[in-house]
Image (cartoon, rainbow, N blue to C red):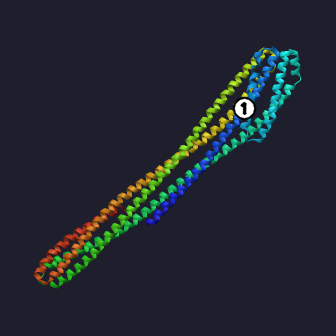
Amino acid sequence: MKFLIGTRIWVSLASIFLILLILGGVSYQNTRSLTETAQRVTHTHVVITDLEDLLSTLQDAETGQRGYVITGEERYLDPYREALRTLDSRIGDLRALTADNAAQQRRLAALGPLVTAKLAELKDSIELRKSKGLDAARKLVATDRGKQEMDEIRKLIGDMKAEEQGLLKRRDEEAKASSRSLFRVLIGGTLLAAALVAIAGLLLTRSIFRMIGKLGQEMRDSADVLASSASEIVATTTQVAAGATETASAVSETTATVEEVKQAAGVSSQKARYVSDSAQKVSQVSQAGRKSVEGAIQGMQRIQEQMEAIAESIVRLSEQNQAIGEIIASVNDLAEQSNLLAVNAAIEAAKAGEQGKGFAVVAQEVKSLAEQSKQATGQVRTILGEIQKATGAAVLATEQGSKAVDAGMKQGTEAGESIRQLADSIVEAAQAATQIAASSQQQMVGMDQVALAMDSIKQASLQNVSSTKQAESAAHNLSASGQKLIRVLEQYRI
């Protein structure tokens, strides 16, 4: 029985531990995948932003060139000079960011000469305006050379943005798939672990109650035998006391009665020793049961620590999602500011009349780009909201699993306390059985003395009366102890 209970406990704990290991491994992999996907999404947004900044810088340079050609004022050339200073570094940054994408590298290789050609066209028109005046510069602009180059640049940048947006969409789908997988694993693993804990507790409780019921039944049977033997001893000693007053006429009857009493005392002593040995065995088994329950409680504590570690990992993931949300909010603010600047630019272009039409086109493009940025940040914010909902659900499931583990620990502690109380009662019963065995042994000694004293009728009679009184008193005590043992066992009947 002890081996069977221990085996069940270890098998249950090993199964739970294995499930927790599998759950932790899968959760780690999914969490790592989510983190990598988020980093790739951020990388893609950086590439898109740099592409938009590159196009915006070229458009600003073109706007500055047109303003200078129209007005001849040097202050309009500031965007052009800024473009000359930053365009090479922007293209270099894009090459580094897209180093793992061969298609984007090919587009960047084609974009570099176009940017160089566009800057050369801007430079030519500016130099003509400086040296030959407005008409010469206007004729160069009217050749549409700059427009064709700018259209090709826009097309290449548009293709690169489309490529990055396609990557962004795929990574979004990967993140959603990883989130769904993590949610299913956490829910299923937690429910399975809780079910195994409940099954292990049920099997352990049933085994302990079955063992205690069997031991209690054996002790009740022994107590019934003890009570029956004590009643027989009382009846026999009463008869001996009555016969001792008629010593002269009943010597032979007295001798026979003494022998019967001796045999009954031997049986009583054997029964008492059997009860004492059984009580000692029951006490040892109850101590083993207490140790098993303590081991089960320690196992539940280890499970609780694992659940708390999983909850902390999920909370850290939630904090990272919040940080990403703050970054997206900053990007949205930048888009709002760009939109506002575009509106102001459109107003200024309207004030400029015919000369501001080109600037109005630029303002419209800036506004369009700002709207696209707002839409992209809105989509990312929606995705983060779904991730945060899934993370919240995982935290809730982990808390429920922790509560189930706490309930299991409480039940195990209550079971241990019940076994401890039963063990204390069994120890008291063992002590009483030992006292009964000692009394039976004393009775045997008294009967031997009575048998030896039969050589002298008078002396034997006196000794018989005295010994019979002692035996009667001991039998009453034995009967009372047996009844007390039966009452104690009845209180713990299962």
Q: Nearer the viewer, residue 285 or 113?
A: 113
**Mark 1 residue type:** Asp
Q: Residue at x 41, y 59 (%)?
A: 291
Instruction: Give the left or right position of residue 191, taking residue 331 as reference.
Output: left
Residue 107 coordinates in the image, percent (x, y): 80, 37
User: Vertical placement of 437 versus 203: above or below?
Assistant: below
Q: Quadrant of residue 418?
A: bottom left
Residue 482, can we see it? Answer: no
Q: Quadrant of residue 159?
A: top right
Residue 252, can we see it? Answer: yes
Instruction: Give the left or right position of residue 328, taking residue 442 as reference.
Output: right
Quarter of the image that includes the C terminus:
bottom left
Which residue position is annotated with label 1?
50
Q: Residue at x 72, y 37 (%)?
A: 96
Q: Secondary structure at mark 1?
A: helix
User: Vertical placement of 249 versus 38: above or below?
Assistant: below
Q: Quadrant of residue 179?
A: top right
Instruction: Give the left or right position of residue 392, taking residue 455 as reference.
Output: right
Q: Residue at x 51, y 49 (%)?
A: 306
Q: Residue furthest left?
A: 458
Q: Nearer the viewer, residue 174 or 241?
A: 174
Residue 304 coordinates in the image, percent (x, y): 49, 49
